[in-house]
Image: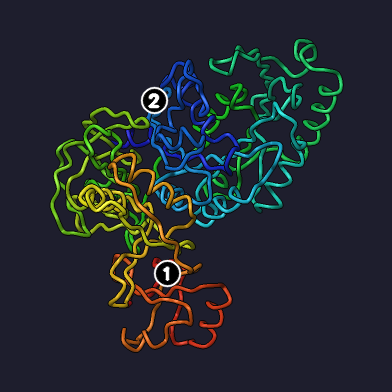
């Protein structure tokens, strides 16, 4: 079992929108042999659609709106790769994915440097000490100087950066990268549309062949920069990478396949296998004799013909075999995991066994929710999945009474994915559930999928609030209703935890100052355990 576990590599790719995250994901699949021809999100009819952006809305928008699992083998390794949404409105989905992985590859646009969403996602990784590898993309376009990009990583993100390789030229003069560890210059040739692996020539940097491929100024500049790095960035400690204190940096162009295989090989060389997870104050070893895992994502209608629901489960310990009977700790129900799959976008194949580090797609019919622990040992309970305070609110209604059944079924199944959060206000005249989202695009996705997958239109009535906080207080509901902020609301979430909703930041701060006995939290994970 230990040898199988050590082969697993489970990681996510994170980035600001349009940094090239999905393109890099697809090129990994190209080098892993999982696909033979690379396409693009905006592919025309004669090209293939992107393997990870499989939802119809993703294809139309050209962005990832849902995290996607892609599993493939590369050499001796079993890779579980999660392509995450870059848009801030879908950051909650990305945060959940980050709880299920052992490392991340952070994609930077070489022409823009550190962007807002990159910084926000990195801070989550840094707080959880998730090992972070950096790929500086789009070096074949006009870009910032590589030294400036390294400086941004160290001064903006406050992390040590070690350039594993270095770009040879930039923009239209970008010809390859120099591997600083193996002392090799990798010179690339472009292929039409970046659809295939490019021919690569490997030489010493001083080789006349390298000089012949670069113009004199680019070669001289690269030589000076490499000489400078030999004094400032000599080596790095593997433990610092594992602890999340140092990021190995790779340069390249995903769309042209420049440096992609070097990144993949470097990641596999410097990353570690599955990390043990905590259960309360105890660490559960990955080779524990009992299977355990947690649900970090629910997805309905991946196969529109069957209208099924898939629970994505991160295997944390032990060995899984198909038809294994486990307990869902939240409900106490015993469940047989029979319909288990290896996933590749929306495609799937039956899986007979899995080990710690793997991600299972399980077709479920019983009550499964994001955050559930499934285990052979009921004493193991994971609390890995965070919830965040929504900032957009609204009420969803069915304008077509004749399609009520389809509307109700769609709402129940889609809300089970936690696309948006659901709250019930504590006023008798407010029977409709209040929906909360991190950003308005989440509502758009909910409505689009409700119509596209269930044939039911809907109308959204925006609510005026901007902030929500979970509360901890000894006051009962009736007393608390008298203390609802002006223009605000009092409600409970799906777990029955009480929340207050505010119209502005000023209103929230004023309320906090005037009611020190009511503690406010922006995540239920921060609530005292006696609440």
Per the image, the residue denoted by label 1 is 526
User: In front: 420, or 203?
Assistant: 420
Q: Is residue 154 above or below residue 192?
A: below
Instruction: Report crowding for label 1: few under 14, some 14 to 19, many 20 or more residues within 10 A (C-alpha).
Output: few
Q: In the figure, is residue 453 to the left or right of 389?
A: left
Q: Is residue 233 above or below residue 42?
A: below
User: In front: 276, or 385?
Assistant: 385
- Percent across and percent down for residue 197 are 55, 15
Residue at x 75% of width, y 19% of height: 205
- Count of numbered circles in the view: 2
For the residues marked 1 and 2, what is the alpha-carbon distance in whole angstroms?
Answer: 39 Å
Q: Secondary structure at mark 2?
A: strand
Per the image, the residue denoted by label 2 is 73
- Percent across and percent down for residue 488 are 45, 77
User: In front: 310, or 4?
Assistant: 310
Does residue 183 show up? Answer: yes
Q: Quadrant of residue 461?
A: bottom left
Q: Quadrant of residue 230?
A: top right
Which quarter shows the N terminus? top left
- Percent across and percent down for residue 236 are 63, 41
Q: Secondary structure at mark 1?
A: helix
Tell me if label 1 and label 2 are in contact, CB under 8 Å: no
- The earlier-in-sequence mark between 1 and 2 is 2
Residue at x 75% of width, y 27% of height: 170
Does residue 287 show up? Answer: no
- Percent across and percent down for residue 177 are 68, 24
User: In front: 412, or 321?
Assistant: 412
Which quarter shows the C terminus? bottom left
Instruction: Report crowding for label 2: few under 14, some 14 to 19, many 20 or more residues within 10 A (C-alpha).
Output: some
Residue at x 76% of width, y 37% of height: 144
């Amino acid at each position: 079992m230990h040898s199988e576990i050590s082969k697993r590599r489970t990681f996510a790719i994170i980035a600001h929108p349009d940094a090239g995250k999905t393109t890099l994901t697809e090129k990994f699949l190209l080098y892993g042999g999982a696909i033979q021809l690379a396409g693009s999100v905006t592919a025309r009819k004669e090209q293939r659609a992107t393997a990870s952006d499989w939802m119809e809305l993703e294809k139309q928008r050209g962005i990832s709106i849902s995290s996607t699992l892609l599993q493939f083998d590369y050499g001796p390794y079993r890779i579980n790769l999660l392509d995450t949404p870059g848009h801030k409105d879908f950051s909650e989905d990305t945060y959940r994915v980050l709880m299920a992985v052992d490392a991340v590859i952070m994609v930077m646009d070489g022409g823009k440097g550190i962007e807002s969403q990159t910084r926000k996602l990195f801070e989550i990784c840094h707080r959880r000490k998730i090992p972070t590898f950096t790929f500086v993309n789009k070096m074949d376009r006009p870009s910032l100087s590589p030294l400036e990009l390294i400086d941004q990583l160290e001064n903006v993100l406050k992390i040590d950066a070690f350039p594993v390789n270095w770009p040879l030229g930039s923009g239209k003069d970008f010809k390859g990268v120099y591997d600083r560890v193996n002392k090799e210059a990798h010179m690339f040739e472009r292929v039409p549309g970046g659809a295939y692996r490019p021919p690569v020539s490997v030489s010493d940097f001083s080789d006349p062949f390298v000089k012949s491929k670069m113009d004199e100024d680019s070669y001289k500049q690269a030589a000076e920069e490499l000489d400078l790095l030999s004094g400032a960035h000599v080596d790095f400690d593997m433990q610092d990478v594992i602890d999340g204190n140092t990021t190995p940096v790779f340069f390249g162009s995903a769309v042209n396949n420049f440096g992609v295989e070097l990144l993949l090989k470097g990641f596999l060389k410097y990353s570690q296998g599955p990390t043990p997870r905590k259960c309360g104050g105890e660490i559960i070893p990955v080779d524990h004799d009992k299977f355990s895992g947690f649900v970090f994502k629910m997805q309905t209608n991946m196969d529109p013909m069957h209208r099924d629901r898939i629970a994505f489960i991160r295997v944390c310990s032990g060995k899984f075999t198909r038809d294994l009977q486990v307990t869902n700790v939240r409900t106490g129900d015993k469940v047989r995991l029979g319909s288990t799959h290896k996933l590749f976008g929306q495609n799937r194949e039956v899986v007979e066994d899995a080990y710690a580090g793997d991600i299972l797609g399980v077709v479920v019919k019983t009550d499964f929710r994001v955050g559930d622990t499934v285990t052979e040992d009921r004493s193991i309970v994971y609390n890995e999945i965070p919830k965040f305070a929504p900032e957009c609110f609204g009420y969803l209604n069915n304008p077509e009474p004749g399609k009520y059944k389809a509307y109700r079924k769609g709402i129940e199944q889609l809300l089970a994915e936690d696309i948006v959060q659901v709250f019930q206000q504590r006023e008798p005249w407010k029977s409709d559930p209040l929906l909360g989202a991190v950003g308005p695009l989440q509502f758009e996705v909910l409505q689009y999928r409700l119509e596209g997958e269930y044939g039911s239109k809907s109308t959204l009535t925006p609510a005026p609030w901007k902030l929500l906080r979970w509360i901890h207080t000894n006051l009962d509901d009736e007393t608390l209703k008298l203390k609802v902020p002006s223009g605000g609301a009092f409600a409970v979430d799906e777990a029955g935890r009480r929340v207050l909703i505010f119209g502005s930041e000023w209103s929230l701060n004023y309320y906090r100052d005037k009611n020190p006995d009511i503690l406010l939290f922006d995540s239920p994970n921060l609530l005292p355990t006696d609440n």
